[in-house]
Image (spheres, rainbow, N blue to C red):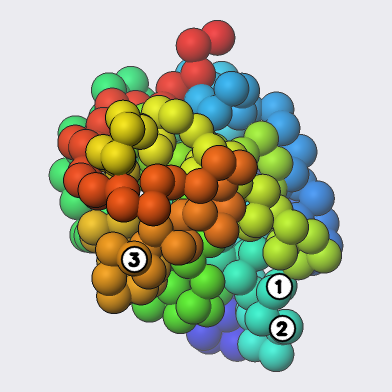
Amino acid sequence: MKKKAFFIIIAMATVGTMPCRAMDFDQFFKDTDTFFEKYVIDGGVRYRWIKGEPERLDKLIAFIASADVTGRESKEQLAFYINAYNLYTIKLIVDHYPVSSPMEIIGFFDTKKIVAAEKKTTLNDLENDRIRKFNDPRIHFALVCAARGCPKIADHGYNPQHLDEQLTKQARLSLNDPTFIRIDGTKVKISEIFKWYRRDFGKTDADLISFINKYRDTPLPEKARLSYYTYDWSLNEASH
């Protein structure tokens, strides 16, 4: 009982004092979907809107903090954690808004504390210690770190019933986006995401090309020469 009360206090400290109706996992997935549908447009986030009406986000964050994922199926856990990462990323931006980049916020990824499933963590640890443990490289196109260099954020949440098709859709959208995969003959410039998480995509360039081509409408050239373009850390704010 003391443990539960402790995390409720943390959750309330994270989001501020507000009324919070009871929520279960099904409701969480539904409300997350509604949230992204309302506040994401053309791959950008309406941070200003959320700042002015934070109640929806606060309720979702409160649930994330106190949720018990013990015994939940793997797809439900993965969908929960992907949503948790994206929602907490938005929460941290909104808490410091206006900013022009997540990098303006000291410790944004590695020291700012968040609470997910009753455990204190950071965005980096949430990604590396929980989400990447599911060994699905498609998650790198679903997780969005509030920067324009990220894959475009989806205007929906992730749910266990459709998670596989949702992750495949995001991989296809990203890997067919000419701003994300930049091709000039046999020269192919790719995101630094593929460098930072290289082992998730295979050991060699051939492995990486094979992974990318799995989701592309037009495969990369057989003798493609890969290089990395500089990551764009400017805020992925919606233009309207």
User: Which residue is nearer to you in this view: 140 or 90?
Assistant: 140
Q: Amino acid at mark 3?
A: Ala
User: What residue did someone put label 3 on?
Assistant: 206
Quarter of the image with the N terminus in it:
bottom right
- The quarter of the displayed image where residue 84 is located: bottom right
Circle 2: element type: loop
Judge whether 98 appears above or below 200 on screen. Answer: above
Q: Amino acid at mark 2?
A: Arg
Marker disc for residue 27: none
Q: Picture coordinates of residue 166 (x, y %)?
A: 70, 53
Q: Residues within 10 Å of mark 3 (few under 14, many from 20)?
A: some
Mark in the foreground, 2 or 3? 3
Quarter of the image with the C terminus in it:
top right
User: Which residue is nearer to you in this view: 84 or 170?
Assistant: 170
Q: Picture coordinates of residue 111 (x, y %)?
A: 22, 59
Circle 1: element type: helix
- The quarter of the displayed image where residue 158 is located: bottom right
Do residues under tags 2 and 1 come within 8 Å of each other at their CB atoms? yes
Marker disc for residue 76: 1
